[in-house]
Amino acid sequence: MSISVSQRMPREWLHLILAMLAVGGIGFVWHTYSGGFTEEEWSKWTPERLRRLLLGPEQIGCYFCCIWAGLILLSRYREVVRQRQAFYLDLLPLDEATRILPEDARPYARKIDQASQRGGPFILTTMLRQALTKYAITRSAADVSEVVRTQAEVEQGRMTTSMGTVNYLVWAIPAIGFLGTVRGLAGGMSMAGVDEDNLQRFLKAATDQLGTAFDCTFVALFLSVVLMYLLLSVQKGEEMLIIDAQSYCQDQLLLRLYDPNPETQSA
C-alpha cells in the first residue's frame, strides 16, 4: 500500500523549526547589540527565588497533573504507532485488478483474523472483517460502505470519550495556578492596616506574596500551553488513523467488490 498524505511526516515540524530559528536569531542580535542582561538583573535570580518560582505547592500540583496527562498521551501516541503497523500487513490482494466476490468474503475475513493475531487488535482489521462479513451476508457493496462508515464513527467516538481524563487535567492545571494566584493575593491583602513602624516589613512581605501569586500563574499557563499542544498532536494522529483506515477500505476493498445486483442499488 502506498503511503497516503496523512501518513507522511507533517510539515508543521519544519515550520516550527523555522519559527524557532527566526525568533532565536532576532533575539540573539537584539541582545548582542543591546548589551543583554546586566549583572544586577542576573543577581535577582537567586536559588531561593528559583525555588519559590518552581517548587511552590501549587506548582507541584501542576507538575503532577502535567506528568499524569503526559504519560496518558504517550501511551495514546504509542497506540497510534502500533495501529499504523496494520497498513503494512498482507490483508487483501495486492493486484488492483482483482475482484472480490461474495464467496471470497469469509476466506478473506479469516485471513485478516489470522494476520491481526500478530500484534493486534487493529482498528483497520476490525473494519475490514466487519465489512467482509456484511458483504458475505447481504452481497451488497452499498451495505459494506455503510458498515465502514459506522465503524469509523464508533472508533472515533471511543477515542474522544477515552480522552476525557486528559481534557480534565488540561483544564485543572490553569485552575490550580489560579488557586495559587488567589492565595498570594489574599496573603498580600491580609497584611494591610499595619502601623508605620512596620511599613517596610509589610511592603516586603506583600511583595513576596504577590510574587507567589504570579509565579503560580506563570508555571501553570506554561505547562498548560505545552500540554495542549501535545494533546492536539495526539488527537490529530488518532483522527488521521481513522481517516486512513477508511481510505484503505475504500481503495483496497470497496472499489474491488463485485455487486451481483447493481440494478438494486440504483433503484
Image (cartoon, rainbow, N blue to C red):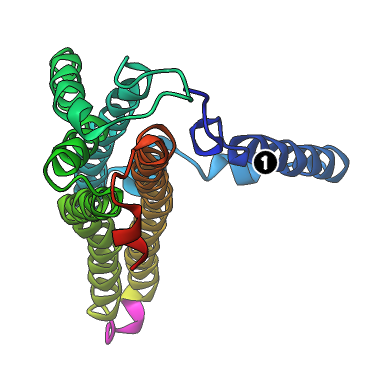
Q: Chief secondary structure of the magenta span?
A: loop
Q: x%, y% of residue 250?
A: 40, 42
| Above or below for 50 versus 212 | above
Q: Quadrant of residue 150?
A: bottom left
Q: Which residue is mark 1?
A: 15
Looking at numbered disc 1 in the image, what kind of residue is underneath it?
A: His
Under circle 1, the secondary element is helix
> Which quadrant does the C terminus fall into?
bottom left
Q: x%, y% of residue 67?
A: 24, 38
| Above or below for 44 versus 10 | below
Name the one closer to the observer, 249 or 88. 249
Q: x%, y% of residue 255?
A: 42, 40
Residue beneath the point at 32% across and 16% down? 89
Name the one closer to the observer, 58 or 99. 99
Residue beneath the point at 21% across and 26% down? 104
Left or right relative to 210: residue 28: right
Left or right relative to 159: residue 113: left
Name the one closer to the observer, 244 or 184. 244
Residue beneath the point at 32% across and 14% down? 90
Which residue ends up furthest to the bottom in the rendered image? 193
**Stretch in magenta:** 192-197
